[in-house]
Image (cartoon, rainbow, N blue to C red):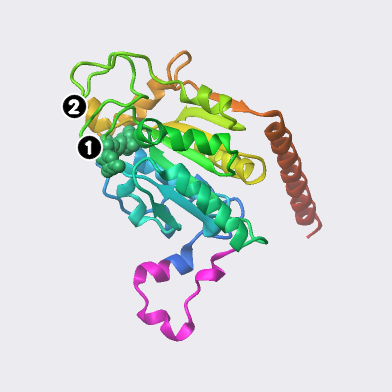
């Protein structure tokens, strides 16, 4: 697993598009310990996007791409919404599904990849908005968890339908008035993390994307656990600054406010016993690897 897979034949190197040459030369694919610190220096982590300037989704997207443990063997499944404006700029295999269908597509894809490549690790990661995950796609989301499909679902929760101008979503806060939902939400935010746990997800995290190292940790955990054990779910607050009337510099503060103790995005996680044992084993192996690297260094 490495960028060897995308090498250009020497004779054609000069005539390939500069972006592709850059990818071949600078991708972090295959690099051990890749993570959010690679953002800004590596080609596959989106140089540009067509989201609103300063939209937290753009940073969240970068952190996630930087944190995938196995990007060259990962297929992401997106859905309609603001996230679909970013996927065309991403150098990771991805599929655009019909709005709401993403977890059904991912289920078939994961199974097909297991049959087609029985000896290779292939990760599938769904990334969709709250409207796609909860409202129109809720049946598909839940059924994939009930079936214990081994992939990760990431929801960019901006608490409304941003891409179509601000309609009400099940994840919207009670009382919130949006541009196209003037009456105000009549009931509480649907507790999808709790539902995910009760529906069979073995790792569930609810948080904001204000801290890149935290996003890296939960994305890695979610993908590795899904690979070995069962469905995993991340609900990440990526506020729509356009809808809440904040400028590009204020999105970070909005997330910090929303993650304070008692607030709706205060860090919350559920890890099944099996997933806990898996993470502990992983940490042990990591420790042993570091110790032997240190040992080798002192002997050199
Ligand atoms: C089947 C279908 N129904 C409705 C739409 C219209 N539509 C496009 S994006 C969107 C809302 C997306 O909301 P969300 O999933 O929360 O993503 P966001 O734009 O907020 O990131 C809707 C209703 C569509 N494209 N396809
Ligand atoms: S509409 Fe909102 S969620 Fe969509 S790109 Fe703009 S700020 Fe981000
Ligand atoms: Mg949304």
Residue sitting at x 34%, y 56% = 89
Q: Which residue is mark 1?
A: 164
- Vertical comparison of 170 with 10: above or below: above
Task: Provide the residue designation for mark 2.
Answer: 180
Q: Which secondary structure type mostly characterizes the magenta part of the structure?
A: helix
Query: Looking at the image, which residue is at 71% across and 42% down?
Result: 282
Q: Quadrant of ligand 1?
A: top left
Does dot 1 land on a helix, a strand or a loop?
loop
Quick check: 32 left or right of 193? right
Look at the image and give the residue range highlighted in magenta.
Answer: 1-22
Classify mark 1 as within 8 Å of ligand 1 or not, answering yes or no: yes
**Percent position (x, y) of residue 257?**
38, 20
* Circles 1, 2 touching at the beta carbon (< 8 Å): yes
Instruction: Pick whichever, 196 or 68, lies toward us.
Output: 196
Which image quarter is the N terminus in?
A: bottom right
Q: Earlier in the sequence, mark 1 or mark 2?
A: 1
Pinpoint residue 26: horizontal percent, then vertical percent.
Answer: 47, 64
Badge 1 crowding class, 10 Å Cα cut-off, few under 14, some 14 to 19, many 20 or more, is few
Residue 278 coordinates in the image, percent (x, y): 71, 38
């Amino acid at each position: 697993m490495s960028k060897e897979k995308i090498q250009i034949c020497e004779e054609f190197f000069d005539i390939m598009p500069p972006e592709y040459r850059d990818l071949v030369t600078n991708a972090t694919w295959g690099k051990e310990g890749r993570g959010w610190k690679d953002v800004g220096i590596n080609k596959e982590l989106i140089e540009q996007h067509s989201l609103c300037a300063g939209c937290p989704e753009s940073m969240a997207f970068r952190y996630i791409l930087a944190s995938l443990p196995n990007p060259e063997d990962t297929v992401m499944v997106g859905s309609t919404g603001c996230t679909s404006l970013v996927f065309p700029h991403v150098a990771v295999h991805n599929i655009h599904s019909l709005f709401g269908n993403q977890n059904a597509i991912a289920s078939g894809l994961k199974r097909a990849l297991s049959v087609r490549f029985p000896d290779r690790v292939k990760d599938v990661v769904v990334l969709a908005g709250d409207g796609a995950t909860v409202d129109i796609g809720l049946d598909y989301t839940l059924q994939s968890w009930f079936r214990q499909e081994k992939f990760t679902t990431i929801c960019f929760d901006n608490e409304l339908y941003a891409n179509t101008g601000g309609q009400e979503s099940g994840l919207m806060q009670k009382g919130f008035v949006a541009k196209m939902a003037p009456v105000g939400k009549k009931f509480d935010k649907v507790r999808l993390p709790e539902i995910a746990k009760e529906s069979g997800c073995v790792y569930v995290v609810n948080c904001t994307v204000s801290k890149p190292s935290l996003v890296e940790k939960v994305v890695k955990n979610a993908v590795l656990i899904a690979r070995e054990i069962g469905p995993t779910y991340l609900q990440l607050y990526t506020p729509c600054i356009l809808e809440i009337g904040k400028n590009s510099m204020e999105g970070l503060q909005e997330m910090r406010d929303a993650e304070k103790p008692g607030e709706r995005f205060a860090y919350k996680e559920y890890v099944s016993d099996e997933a806990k044992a898996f993470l502990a084993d992983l940490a042990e192996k990591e420790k042993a690897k570091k110790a032997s690297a240190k040992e080798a260094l002192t002997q050199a």
